[in-house]
Amino acid sequence: MTATVSIASIEKNFGATKTLKGVSVDVAAGEFLTLVGPSGCGKSTLLRIIAGLIPQDGGTISIDGAPVDRLPPKARDVSMVFQSYALYPHMSVRENIATPLNVRHLSRLSRLPLVGGLVPGQAATRKDIREQVERVASQVEIEALLDRRPAQLSGGQRQRVALARAMVRQPRVFLMDEPLSNLDARLRVHMRGELSDLHRRLGATFIYVTHDQVEAMSMSSRVALMLGGEIVQVATPDEIYSNPTDVRVARFIGSPEINLLPAEADPQGRISIAGHATPLRVMTHGPLTVGLRPEAFAVNDDNAKIAIPARLLRSERLGHDVLLHVRHDGQEKGSTAVRVSAAEFDTLRSEGGLSDTFLIGARAKAALLFDADGKRIAAAQASPAGKASSAPAREMASA
């Protein structure tokens, strides 16, 4: 079973601090939506409001079209996986997974450790719970661990137990609050694949919180970037990377960070970077910013329409790729990142292409343009004569 989730104008204040500022987003049934953003942006607070663990100060949460704001957590039919896993250390894996079913289907007396088994009429229910636990344990491949306690498990195994405990309820919505942050890098990569496979198998609605953009980009149907208590943009991973609507989105999504080059548009809308003319045109004039991803650059490329002299500061070999940190004309501090293949780097170095000053270039269509307020603006179409067209620039997609 799966469900839609509608988050409408959610507000939350902690004292004088406004943590959530009218957050709205709709999650489709069966979607994997990731809330990503830096620490303190409000994403975990929003997840806890959806779960019913804390109340909001304004707005509405609806599941399958029905408001759930006044319902307690257990009545919302959602399951939450916490960053700390929240496993009971004195219980076995089997008992941990069974806990939601025991609470839902067994009486309070039946759950007592010594006398519970003596309560009549519970045998069939207990057998059904046992079978459900074993089925879910099989799905996440922890059948052999059912009689162990959490202290006897690795971090990845504990994560699977927490997932199994969430799955056994067969909730309409899964909520996950940074569930991989306590794992080492290798295990995080493995568990990303596991979670993606689990989502495909279950077809359930996932709302996932993380500060790690790699997790967001690699697993999600859509990504919602949160900054300062607001959702800045919601889009597919490809769209939010290639078409950010705000310079803050462009900076947060992508590793290494996008290069932001100060630029100037003359009264005719012709853009220059560090005094070097480019084919870029806009329907405005004045200062603006040109964003170029590290992979958009090439070194000494005769076909590049945007070309700026630069010098090498240092290089980082990243296996198949090499990251060049360069400083271009007009750049007084910091560096610009250029990604090239390891083979290209070796060729450039052996042929002296990185000695002294060289050109870093990019194609015009790779450039992202932002106005002085950091909002995305569109490039104007150039006429055959090379002048900016008077036709209106296309509208950028809204967040």
Image (spheres, rainbow, N blue to C red):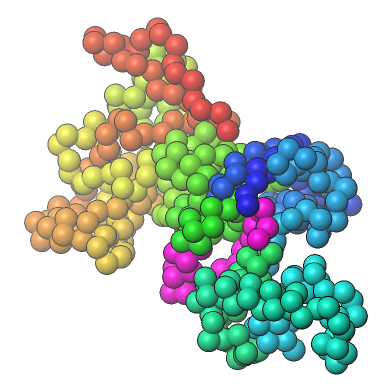
Q: Nearer the viewer, residue 135 or 342?
A: 135
Q: Position of residue 190 (x, y in %)?
A: 44, 70
- Does residue 261 appear left or right of residue 310 in this picture? right
Magenta residues, as a range? 170-195
Above-or-below relation of 253 to 163: above
Measuring 63% from the left and 72% from the top, which residue is drawn there? Answer: 132
The residue at the far top in this view is 390
User: Is residue 204 inside the magenta stretch?
Assistant: no
Q: Nearer the viewer, residue 272 or 60?
A: 60
- Does residue 75 appear left or right of residue 192 in this picture? right
Measuring 21% from the left and 46% from the top, which residue is drawn there? Answer: 299
Q: Position of residue 288 (x, y in %)?
A: 47, 29
User: Is residue 193 inside the magenta stretch?
Assistant: yes
Above-or-below relation of 40 to 377: below
Q: In this figure, what is the number of numbered marks?
A: 0
The residue at the far left in this view is 351
Above-or-below relation of 318 to 172: below
Measuring 66% from the left and 82% from the top, which residue is drawn there? Answer: 94
